[in-house]
Amino acid sequence: MEIFLVVAGFLVGIAVGATAIGAGLLTVPFLMLLGIRPTEAVGTALAINLATRLVAAWQHSRQKTVHYGWVASMALGSIPSAVLTIFLLSFFKAKMSVESLDTTVAKVVGAMLVIMSLVGIFSEFAMHHQKLGKPLLLKLGEGWKGKALAVLTGAFTGASTTSTGIGAGGIIVAFLATCTSLDPSLVVGTSVFHGVLLTSVSLLGHAWVGELNFLTAALFLVGSLPGALFGSRISLLVPKRALKLTLLTIVLASGVRALI
């Protein structure tokens, strides 16, 4: 089992490094495929994703590619939402059998895989238009309308990330790419930095509830960290956009299968 976790981590790391696809979108289904309980897979994926995001957030902060105003607005919705979701998870864990809870979480994960793969495909086209100088903008700016939508987007992201381990990056990237005029580098950096704040709170909550396996996370990271480095190095050699869209299509199919 240990070697499979390391290999799975390496493969996920390559995919994330080469395409910048959300780590949670690949990590959670991979862990479930290896036989880890859905609820525990979510908590473990959060630990894995936090470790990888910390390094990226530090680098983006140094590069000044983080818009802290948008981070604050989104966190105003995501952090309270994450805390509330943890309390709901604790409540249902006390009221439901382990099998029923895992079945429910698996279905919710399947739904989020479908949603986030579609969001990822949309974001890819939105970012592509932005690079071409034809951004798909709602132009909300940082006025009250923009901040209100940022809070609502954060609230949904907080609930989805805490309950499924998925969405901390993809939803935020889609929001920033379509509703703000941020450069692509600022979109990514702002998303990553906010993801660290949200994932930290979600992870602490899962540790409190008892749905977290540190050994599994450590073994996965042994493979995923060098995998991400290798994937980043070969990113210029592979058809990044085509590979990313292919992976998102596979994730979409796996999400549909989980719901059937």
Image (cartoon, grey):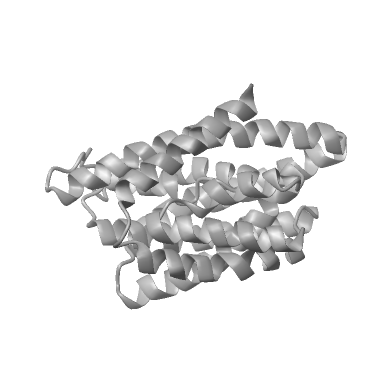
Q: Which residue is depicted at the point 32% across and 56% down?
A: 238
Q: Quadrant of the N terminus?
A: bottom right
Q: Which residue is depicted at the point 39% across and 59% down?
A: 18
Query: Which residue reaches farthest left?
Result: 133
Left or right: residue 110 versus residue 235 is right
Residue 37: quarter of image: top right
Most foreground residue, 184 or 74: 184
Location of residue 143 in the rendering, given as x and y in whole percent from the top left corner: 26, 47
- Position above or below: 216 against 153: below
Location of residue 252 in the rendering, given as x and y in whole percent from the top left corner: 49, 33
Q: Which residue is depicted at the point 19% across and 43% down?
A: 129
Most foreground residue, 48 or 222: 222
- Position above or below: 199 against 149: below
Location of residue 137 in the rendering, given as x and y in whole percent from the top left corner: 21, 40
Location of residue 99 in the rendering, given as x and y in whole percent from the top left corner: 84, 34
Is residue 151 visible in the rendered image? The answer is no
Most foreground residue, 231 or 160: 231
Residue 200: quarter of image: bottom right
Most foreground residue, 95 or 6: 6
Residue 185: quarter of image: bottom left
Query: Which residue reaches farthest top?
Result: 260
Count of numbered marks: 0
Q: Quadrant of the C terminus?
A: top right
Left or right: residue 102 versus residue 50 is right
Left or right: residue 38 versus residue 46 is right
Is residue 15 visible in the rendered image? The answer is yes
